[in-house]
Amino acid sequence: MNFESITEESLNLALDIMNSNPTYNMIENGNPVRTIKEVRSELLNSTTNSYLIKMNEEPIGIIDFLDHNPKDNHPWIGLFMIHGAYHSLGYGKKAYVAFEESLKQQHFKKIRLGVLDNNEQAKRFWRSVGYSFYGKSELEGKVVDCFEKKLE
């Protein structure tokens, strides 16, 4: 697994990954399909670092990472998504473990993330890789369950 920064040139790959997950898109914004404009706004910004997750040079996912959230002084994963064709094959866990290892090498001590309240599949995934629920918040009018993990 490796991580490649998303650029304007690779944005269509990210769009394909996002649109391979219509259930998440419905939960997140009420529409099963995202536009290139929406994906550009979410992944090509000056606040977060967005990466294609690649396995043998094949893009299989996306991770959007904020290394310092000024609201709580912690790093956050904003989006972690595996292409729909690769669900339930263990790639998500492998990709996350590789990303976590890179965070440890950069001396991050804790990582946080939010999961939309009604995204039970995501909550199960994050618990399975060691995250613990610590509270609820609201983001753009949606209830979000907040999770964190200490990196050792």
Image (cartoon, grey):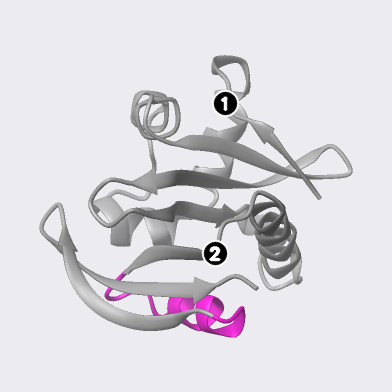
Going by the numbered disc 2, the residue's amino acid type is Lys
User: Taking 107 as reference, is 11 above or below it?
Assistant: above
Q: Nearer the observer, disc 2 or disc 1?
A: 2
On residue 133, the disc is none
- Asked whether the residues under the numbered discs 2 and 1 touch, taking CB atoms below 8 Å apart as contact, a structural biologist would say no
Q: Considering the numbered disc 1 on the image, is that residue within a helix, a strand or a loop?
A: helix
Q: Identify which residue, 104 or 112, lies in the foreground.
A: 104
Q: What whole-number distance in Å separates the C-alpha atoms at marks 2 and 1?
A: 33 Å
In the image, which residues are magenta?
A: 116-130
Q: Is residue 78 above or below residue 124?
A: above
Label 1 Cα neighbours within 10 Å, binned few <14 / some 14-19 / many ≥20:
some
Residue in the image at 37% along x and 32% along y:
47
- The residue at 68%/57% (across/down) is 85
- Report the side of 8 relative to 72 (left or right): right
Outermost residue on the top side: it is 9
Marker disc for residue 12: 1
In the image, residue 120 sits, relative to residue 91, either above or below, namely: below
Look at mark 2 in the image and give the residue it sits on.
109
Label 2: element kind: loop
Front residue (pair 67, 90) = 67
In what quadrant of the picture does the C terminus appear? bottom right
Q: Depth check: give the residue in front, 116 or 67.
A: 67
Amino acid marked by disc 1? Asn
In the rendered image, residue 126 lying in the magenta stretch gets the answer: yes
Residue at the image point whose x is 46% and y is 52% from the top = 79
- Judged left or right of residue 15, residue 5 is right
